Image (cartoon, coloured by chain):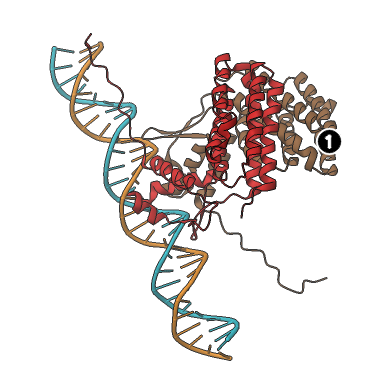
Chain colours: A red, B brown, C orange, D cyan
DNA sequence: CGCTGGTATATGGTATACCAGATGACACTA
DNA sequence: TAGTGTCATCTGGTATACCATATACCAGCG
């Protein structure tokens, strides 16, 4: 059947230059291994505005936003510096993450659908046993995906937003984390137990398992990861 | 004894106009009862810049920051609007608060000094029994002070920062919350039990008590507070 | 009277110019 | 040589002018 009337989509308004500059900068910063070697940690407003082909004004606003998020520090008359988080800041972030994901797991037991919880299996089974042998970076990403999935099941948008902000930073040091075979295997075991608790709708237990699991990562980072 | 050498403080450099505008705006917004009546929810960049005696540029950066924090929404070619949080957003914030304060309580059992925990008594005893009769606004402030104190004992700067941001919003609806005598008395009872758990260094128990206590507030708000 | 389309105005977005303080090179002095 | 003053220059902060569009108002037409 042919359309007998025009059905038009609203024109997708192109984002503001500020928004685009923000995304571009954030992508660029999060992709570089700022904890490696001697990468240039200094940015220049004029350089960047020239490279992006926009004026300093929207670029400055994007930088101000990144500054507030803690990815960058803007110092008057000195420069703009990409921030390297201290180990203490990283462990604090993981602690907050533990608290929020734990709460999300509790909530999930109340509000998540059976099929949503069941879908978690797919995120774990892919990495059962042998798959652990793959390079750790890949495992780490899948690991984060699993945790984000749990957080999503809690259906608390604020928790999702806050943890998203944290993942950006935590992810930046994942290459520094020593994810030895041992940890990866144990991690997968933990994940399976967490799913069981969720399926049993045991919020108390699921929350505790998630919290302990993530706090072990925190302790691991504190003990074995060397930043600077 | 007289000083035998000059000890000079660094000259407190006057903050940037952006920072000052930010503080002024934030104070102004948080002080007004945005959930009452028909207060003007619209702001105008040019008006504000004129009133503050600064140009639009630093003012815009301050507004952008408030926008990111969720106090304000800047819409292109439409205006700047003071945000009224929905009830769902408020309850989500209280949930996050519960998760973080609970974690802070657990941490406090490990890292807080005995005298620090003991100091909590002062924040509760002031409001024992009769004091509850005071007007609820005052109680509410003291209540928040108590919870902030616990969070402080956890010595996790990030938790403190995030919850500080949340308190701004939650505080805005405190006048809408029905803090009947009953709740206030029970609340004080809860607080005393929480202190006991902290003194016993029972992190598990302290965390659970704090979480349950705050989640009860969440449920209360969800059931009895009417926004819009 | 009511709908339609043009148009003035309001308002946030962007570009540009200038300002002030921080830095470092360098010459000068003791 | 070490310390000091000067100055060019770099860099983020601020002011201002202009741009693009959402909105409201109004004239014109039926």
When asked about the image quadrant of residue B90, the answer is top right
User: Is there any visible trace of residue A123 in the rendered image?
Assistant: yes
Occupied quadrant, residue B1: bottom right
Task: Locate residue A28, reporting x and y percent.
Answer: 44, 46
**Numbered disc 1: what chain?**
B
Work out whether residue B167 or residue B100 is closer to the camera in this orientation and state it.
B100
Q: Mark 1 packing: few (<14 Cα in 10 Å), some, or many (20+)?
A: many
Residue at x-position 76% and y-position 35%:
B106
Element assignment for label 1: loop
Q: Is residue A190 above or below residue B107?
A: above
The residue that appears at 71% across and 34% down in the rendered structure is B103
Residue drawn at the location 40% of the way across and 42% of the way down? A18
The residue lying at 76 percent from left, 27 percent from top is B208
Q: Position of residue B186 (x, y in %)?
A: 79, 22
Q: Which of the 4 quarters of the picture holds residue B167?
A: top right
Asked whether, in this view, residue A126 is left or right of residue D23, the answer is right
Q: Left of A207 or right of it: where is A67?
A: left
Can residue B216 be seen here? The reply is: no
Most distant residue in the top direction: A1
The residue closer to the viewer here, B94 or B82, is B94
Q: Which quadrant of the figure contains the C terminus of chain A?
A: bottom right
Total labels drawn: 1
To which residue does mark 1 refer?
A: B201
Q: Residue A157: horizontal and vertical position, in percent?
A: 55, 27
Going by the image, does B63 lie left or right of D23? right
């Amino acid at each position: 059947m042919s359309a007998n009337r025009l059905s038009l989509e609203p024109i997708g308004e192109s984002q503001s230059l500020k928004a685009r500059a923000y995304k571009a900068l954030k992508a660029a910063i999060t992709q570089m291994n700022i904890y490696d070697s001697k990468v240039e940690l200094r940015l220049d407003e004029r350089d960047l505005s020239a490279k992006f082909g926009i004026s300093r004004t929207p670029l400055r606003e994007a930088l101000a936003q990144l500054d507030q998020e803690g990815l960058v520090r803007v110092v008057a008359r000195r420069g703009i510096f990409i921030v390297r988080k201290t180990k203490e800041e990283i462990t604090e972030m993981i602690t907050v993450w533990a608290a929020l994901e734990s709460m999300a797991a509790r909530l999930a037991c109340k509000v998540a659908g059976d099929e949503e919880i069941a879908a978690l299996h797919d995120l774990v089974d892919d990495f059962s046993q042998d798959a652990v042998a793959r390079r750790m970076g890949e495992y780490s990403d899948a690991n984060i995906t699993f945790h984000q999935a749990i957080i999503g099941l809690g259906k608390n948008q604020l928790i999702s937003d806050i943890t998203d902000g944290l993942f950006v930073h935590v992810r930046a040091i994942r290459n520094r984390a020593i994810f030895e075979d041992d940890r990866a295997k144990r991690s997968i075991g933990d994940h399976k137990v967490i799913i069981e608790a969720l399926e049993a709708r045991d919020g108390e237990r699921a929350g505790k398992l998630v919290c302990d699991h993530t706090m072990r990562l925190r302790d691991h980072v504190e003990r074995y990861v060397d930043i600077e």
